[in-house]
Image: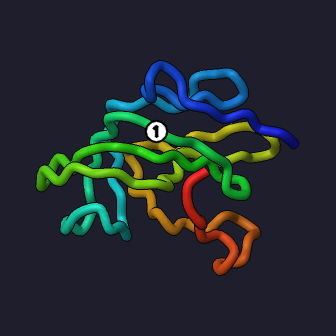
Amino acid sequence: MVVSVRTLDDGAWISVNDSRAVGVSQIWPIARHDFCGCETAHLLLEAFYDVGVDGRRIVAGVVGQCIDCGTEGSIDTLPVGRIVEGEFSAYEPGQVQSLLEPVDGVPEDEHRLSGRF
């Protein structure tokens, strides 16, 4: 199955199969991260600079700021959704998402991301 992913509108949206799927200007609580010193970073997404597919997950390169401590920076591989039975299912920004969340059915050592797409 082929899934088309790209950024739109100068990095404001991620398009999945030619439909706007995930937008910036949302706060994403991120656990188990290296973004800042906060236990859970509440990351305000400012732009997507890259997007790709890792197994069944859609991952994005994002630029943002932690609204708790003010740290600004980027994350190369933030999971923003996954493919379930051939359809895109977005992660809810209000749920704490881990940067190392396992992909269902994929052994833990195979789900790590190896860089930008």
The residue sitting at 44% across, 57% down in the picture is 97
Whole-percent x, y for residue 65 in the image: 23, 46
Asked which quadrant contains residue 4, the reply is top right
Nearest the eye: 8 or 58:
8
Nearest the eye: 39 or 4:
4
Which residue is under mark 1?
49
Total labels drawn: 1
Residue 3 higher or lower than 110, as above or below: above
Mark 1 Cα-neighbour bin, 10 Å: few <14, some 14–19, many ≥20: many
- How is this picture coloured? rainbow
Q: Residue furthest left?
A: 69
Q: Residue furthest right?
A: 1
Does 111 sit left or right of 50 as displayed? right
Nearest the eye: 109 or 82:
109
Whole-percent x, y for residue 76 in the image: 46, 54
The residue sitting at 65% across, 69% down in the picture is 111
Residue 1 higher or lower than 25, as above or below: below
Residue 12 higher or lower than 3, as above or below: above
Quadrant assignment for the N terminus: top right
Whole-percent x, y for residue 53 in the image: 67, 49
Whole-percent x, y for residue 46 in the image: 32, 35
Q: Secondary structure at mark 1?
A: strand
Q: Look at label 1 and name its amino acid.
A: Tyr
The residue sitting at 38% across, 34% down in the picture is 47
